[in-house]
Amino acid sequence: MISGIVTDKEGNPTDGNGKKLSASAYQPPKEVMDLFAQVQNDYTVAYNLQHRPFKEFDGISLLERARRDQESFGAYVGAEYVPAQARWRWKGRKNTTRNRLIGILAHMLSAMLFPYVRAVNDQNEEEKESAKVMQILIEDHLKKAGYEHKFLYMVISALVNPAVFVGIEYVEALQRVKVRGTDNRVKVLEVVDELLSGLQMHIIPIDEILLADFFTFELQRQPYVIRVRRIPWDEARALYGDHEDFEYVEAGQTRVVLTGQENQTLYDIEWTEADRDYVQEITAYYRSEDLQVTFVGGVFMGNKEDVYNTNTFEHRRMVAHEGGWITAPVYPFAKSGFEPLDPTGRFAYYKSAAFKAYWDDASINRAYQLLQDGMFLDVIKPNFISGIAKVDGTVIAPGASIALPKDAAVTPYSLGSNLAAAAQVLVVNKEDLAESTQDESQGGIAEQGITATGVAVAERNAKLILGVFGLMTANLVEQIGSLVMDCIIQHATVPQVDANVPNGKKYLTFLAKGEENGKNVTNKIMFTDKHMGREYTKEEVREEEWRLYNQTGDSPRERYSSDLRLYEVNPYQFARMRYTTFMDADKIVSRSMGTDRERKMLAFNMMTDPRVAPYTDQKAVIEDFVVDEFAEGDPDRYMAKIDPNQMMGMMGQNMGAPNPAMAAPQQQPVLPGTPAV
């Protein structure tokens, strides 16, 4: 790894075992060497922070805290040497903490949501259609990146680790494909790797993100961030194979630079045997300098000319500047956790649920082991021996027996009340753990003797715990949505070079599955430059809407029932809207607890109450609260042919009651189609 190296008495660099390092064949220009030395120094500072004890972690380091909490979640037992006379003792542990965290995970999975979007134009006016298109594109890109599956690991990481880091990047990777031609010869082609290309979303291990300062909470305020990972050499070739210096990248090797020398030299250093097919990829991000540099196996993979000005951030965000628009660098990472750790909001990491439950879990398992040992001793009793014999301590074990001389006294072991005391400790610890995480009843584990009041208390405690965690999760989803939005603006709105079109430029078109008022629809978003530079009146906008609507079907009936939604988008204006992503934390909590449906049913019962129904649009009530909830993608087939308001009116007339809905019928507008953007 990039770090300082060890030297011998003569000042020659070694591998730490006395073996001298050889100078690398790769010797870049001095400017690149100076940059390498800077990254190496910053890496060392951040690496030491990860291994430094902090009071916030109970006096241990970040990585040690993560290791212990991961062991709690995994119910890790481990292997250790045990003397023969002590092997009877119980070494297992309970899955109590793991079960509690899995219970919270199950609640949060039911609350998985995609980020919502707001959009404002340069006149500070809300642009609902632009926001809708952006939201469709964000959801589509996240689904293709495996968001619905990776959300599970996002939540697990927040529950178990001091922080969860999510990386968002847009990749254009190549792969080698062998094709047999008509002449029966095999050609090796380089084509786009569909698996590695496009929007990629990564759940980053806690040790792969190195922060410059542990007391800077906001990620975007960090002086620098370094991402370290080991990747297969083949993957490195797919990502960086077209770089002129990739030939120096060797599997199982990296490089270090001896700092402090007037003429710096790079040295080759081998990794462990387990890394022989891998290479080390280190990317250093300096946001305030707009500098992003990557070293693969110690080889610089950037632009060597004017290094500090030509290697800018890949991930950028559109911002207004002096009446125009520019792109500014943004760290391509999102960060969150389970609960805040520092009350002042300075510390960069969080208190995980596993950390919160650590000592309760340790006490439970200690009491559990004592209970098992005590039960073992009580069932298969050892004997206490007095007399002329001298007996070794190994006799104090279940079922132990020994030949005794004449006149020796043998007294069976009696456990007394200690077994009940251990059992009581278990009960107390389980109650403490329920307060820290959630009660077993909320995780689907039924217990005998639990009253309705007890269940209500457990549910109220679960809402409190999930309320904080729901807020943290909502913030994480907002950050992810903003990063994905940056990638869409940066890549989806830019035309592709295509010689088959008149002006040589072709804009992208997206087909995205979605849902609209409970109905499954297909959104076709077409970026086009034909609207650029044109000002539309309201009448012209209406004409464009009708034009798009008429393209959804050949007949009025087909167009009315069509599930196709067409959008024509001006990429220039679309990219220059001011977007914000947001999430409703209360919605996450209500969905995780299953109370969102209860609230819907309460609202439905109120809306259909005979005293309220005459004043409401019953058709809209049925659509919103019943059909959308249970129609499963096709609500039209459930709708009655008669207007529910007319039905209520007839019922009111038969009962002799006035019906305001009949006196002033509410007309439901039928929109002609989706408007242009």
Image (spheres, grey):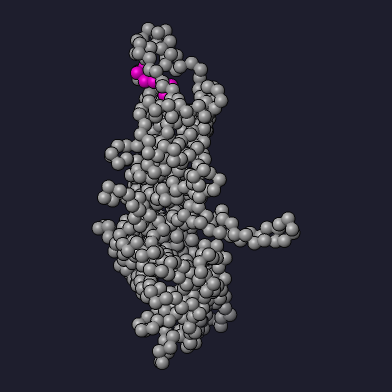
Q: Can residue 173 be seen in the rendering of this structure?
A: yes
At 36% from the left and 73% from the top, the residue drawn is 38
x and y percentages locating residue 172 in the rendered image? 51, 56
Give whichever of 569, 126 is nearer the camera.
569
Residue 282, above or below 408: above
Give the dominant element type of the magenta stretch: helix, strand or loop: helix
Number of numbered markers? 0
**Is residue 257 toward the left or the right of residue 633 in the image?**
left
Question: Given the current orientation, which residue lies at the most extreme left position?
Answer: 344
Give whichever of 167, 575 is nearer the camera.
575
At 27% from the left and 60% from the top, the residue drawn is 346
x and y percentages locating residue 611 in the rendered image? 35, 18
Question: Given the current orientation, which residue lies at the most extreme bottom position?
Answer: 10
Question: Magenta residues, as a range?
Answer: 613-620
Q: Quadrant of the C terminus?
A: top left
Residue 56, above or below 643: below
Q: Can residue 225 be seen in the rendering of this structure?
A: no
Question: Given the current orientation, which residue lies at the most extreme front position?
Answer: 502
Q: Quadrant of the N terminus?
A: bottom left
| Residue 283 drawn in magenta | no
At 46% from the left and 73% from the top, the residue drawn is 298
Q: Quadrant of residue 161?
A: bottom left
x and y percentages locating residue 110 in the rendered image? 46, 44
